[in-house]
Image: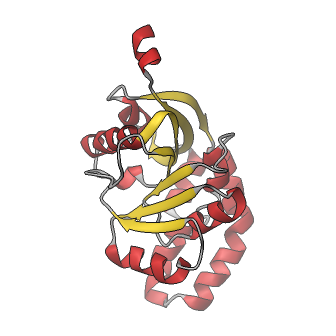
Amino acid sequence: MFCSSIWVLAHVSLTNQNALEVSCGRGAGAVWCVHYYVPGSYMGVDLSPSVIDICRKCHSMISRLSFVVADATKYLPFENESLDIVLCVEATHAYGGSAAVQRFASEVARVLRPNGYFLWCDLFHIDGSDTSIDYLTANGELIVEEKINITRNVLHALDIQSNTRAEFIERYVRPKEQEYFRLFAGLPGTQMYNGMYEGHIQYWRAVFRKKTTTDMTTI
């Protein structure tokens, strides 16, 4: 669902900035961002070596774009205060709980320059079992500049794309794997889609800013 790229970027410009996308998957979103926003550099990291291998093979000819294997809940292989923007789309819910998300948030804060931005979107259950926004600010290193519930927007986008995605899955995916791909695509009738439609799951985007010395002295 990388239509979320449009929403997660909000009003923050990537142009001429050094950006990092965490949990980049096969790199489609990274390619889209480089093409439309022309950052100074754009790096994608993912936990899976095989996925990063695919990224490097498929996107090696694109300038300003590179990919690295990394577990973002443990360590991001970048120098302190070396990045302007970090993005994370639909990933923190899979990081394994509050402690892992807080470690990830600390790594984000470490690699961001002062006043750098962390752009995030994800879904979570409203029963409190996955309150990622709270986990991301628990260490006190990131300030929430903006947070918006975009569940309706996501459902609308899924509705628009549902027929095309369903036809693609029916045509190109093996029958025994189709249900998984339907769920991943958020098609109507799946647990994820129904959860958002019925209000059990919400989808949020947020803009965080790294605290500066000035921020800390005024709190």
Residue closest to the eye, 98 or 119:
119
Q: Position of residue 210 (x, y in %)?
A: 46, 31
Number of residue marks: 0
Q: Is residue 109 left or right of residue 84?
A: left
Q: Is residue 118 above or below residue 115?
A: below
Q: Residue furthest top?
A: 218
The answer to whether any part of residue 219 appears in the image is no
Q: Is residue 135 left or right of residue 159?
A: left
Q: Position of residue 115 (x, y in %)?
A: 51, 31
Give the colouring mode of the picture. secondary structure
Figure quadrant of residue 213: top left
Q: Quadrant of the N terminus?
A: bottom right
Q: Is residue 106 left or right of residue 11?
A: left
Q: Position of residue 193 (x, y in %)?
A: 56, 58
- Residue at screen point 41% across, 62% down: 45
- Residue at screen point 50% across, 75% down: 181
- Residue at screen point 44% across, 40% down: 112
Q: Position of residue 107 (x, y in %)?
A: 33, 43
- Residue at screen point 45% across, 83% down: 177
Q: Is residue 178 above or below residue 104?
A: below
Residue closest to the eye, 41 or 125:
41
The answer to whether any part of residue 55 appears in the image is yes
Q: Residue furthest right?
A: 160
Q: Quadrant of the C terminus?
A: top left
Residue closest to the eye, 130 or 145:
145
Q: Is residue 218 above or below residue 62?
A: above
